[in-house]
Image: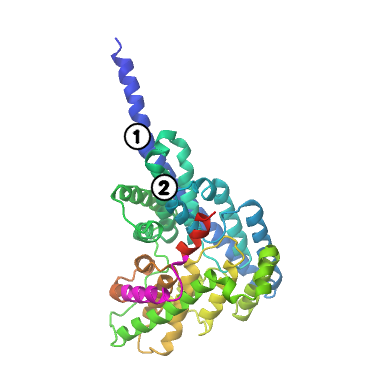
Amino acid sequence: MHIPGFIDRRTILRARRLWLHYGVFWLGAIATGLVAVMYARLIDFGYDAFLRVVAVYWWLPLLLTPAIGALAVWLTRRFFPGSEGSGIPQVIAMLHDKRELGPRLLTLRILVGKIAISFLSILGGFTIGREGPTIHVGAALMFSLRRFYPTRLRNMRGGALERNLALAGAAAGLSAAFNAPLAGVVFAIEELTRSFEQRTSGVLITAIIFAGIVSLALQGNYVYFGTIDLTGHFPESLALAVVLLGVVTGIAGGIFCWLLLNTERWMPGRLASWRQTHPVAFGAACGLVIAVIGVVAGGHTFGSGYAEARGMLEGHTEVGASYPLLKMASMVGSYLPGAPGGLFAPSLAIGAGIGNALHLVFGNMELPMLIALGMVGYLAAVTQSPITAFVIVIEMINGHALVLSLMATALIASQVSKLFAPPLYEALAQKYMGK
């Protein structure tokens, strides 16, 4: 007489376990994919609006960008502390530090601030990308799902559940942002955790699959920068080009990392003091610098640089040899104030510009080949994660014909970069671990 009740209770308990082990997680991965796609469309809408206005009023950035720079810094510091920068250092700090950093660095409030203020910044033409912020947003979204789990599960193995949720959300965010599922896995292993744990592999892959399905359903199966067109003929100078581009992008990326990590060593004392005491005014000053550089460069340094990089790959965008330097200066100016914004897409654009400039030296080589090598080299130099950089670029340009060349360039560039500065994201993560 009591068997049906027993079966009902057992069925309910089993259903609850399945919901906790799979349902909540799958729902979070799907939500991450949706948010990543909507965020990408929001950023594209904001930058298109900026370009339409600037096409009519070329001088407007000289007023608009400083005002938005000041507002973005004020909003970040007043309402959304912890949302600054790309967000990757915050995720690394949460994954590696034993203290409870997640509730401070991976919250829904920070998620909202990350999206809103980066959208505001792109409306002002700041040189930022959306990929790093998408990683932060994905990690925060998945981490917030911990509230659906019992306390005993959240506290098991020193909070392993919460770390797995954040790690999976970060990997899913990168995958959805670039439509690059392999890059999501590699990034999680090489950059975020610096290790591979078998028990987390299924978690990562499942999150990436579900987020990827959502991205494919809404955007289709696209290649981020389009498929590069190569004839298949590799010139004898390819090996020399790989070495030279690896060294040049490694030096450029290493200097960029050094500038961000050592502001007290190159910034004049009065300016550094003013930055500390008047951060909002400093944000406005950086906005003015970004605007002046953008106007001088004909608008090419505004935004993430996606259009310029793709245009160079397809051969219909002309930028001068000074483009990489101007873009890097604008990128530094965008990052120093502390407002949200990523480094991935601008780094790829700078690398593309370096490859484009070196076509003057290697005129016998196909331009898309040099641009692809420059992209992987500079990204590897900034992140000092050569495997991640290589996999991202391979998936973004469908460049399987250049596998060995891209791998070699990424490895050389990352090693050269280490001569100038430690890994950027890990170094930036230390300030969160130290608080």
Badge 1 marks a residue whose secondary structure is helix
Task: Write the residue at 50% across / 70% down.
Answer: 346
Of the residues shown, which amino acid type is indicated by label 1?
Answer: Leu
For the residue marked with disc 2, what is the amino acid? Arg
Seen from the viewer's position, the closer of residues 57 and 159 is 159
29 to 86, vertically: above or below = above
Mark 1 = which residue? Answer: 18
Question: Residue 101 bears which disc, if any?
Answer: none
Report the magenta stretch's main SS.
Answer: helix
* Nearer-N-terminus badge (2/1): 1
62 sits to left or right of 40: right
The boundaries of the magenta stretch are: 406-424
Q: Quadrant of the N terminus?
A: top left
The residue identified by callout 2 is: 163
Judge whether 403 appears above or below 162 on screen: below
Query: Where does the image place residue 362, in percent across and percent down from the top left?
Result: 38, 88
Give the farthest residue toward the top: 1
Tell me residue 19's x, y (percent): 38, 35
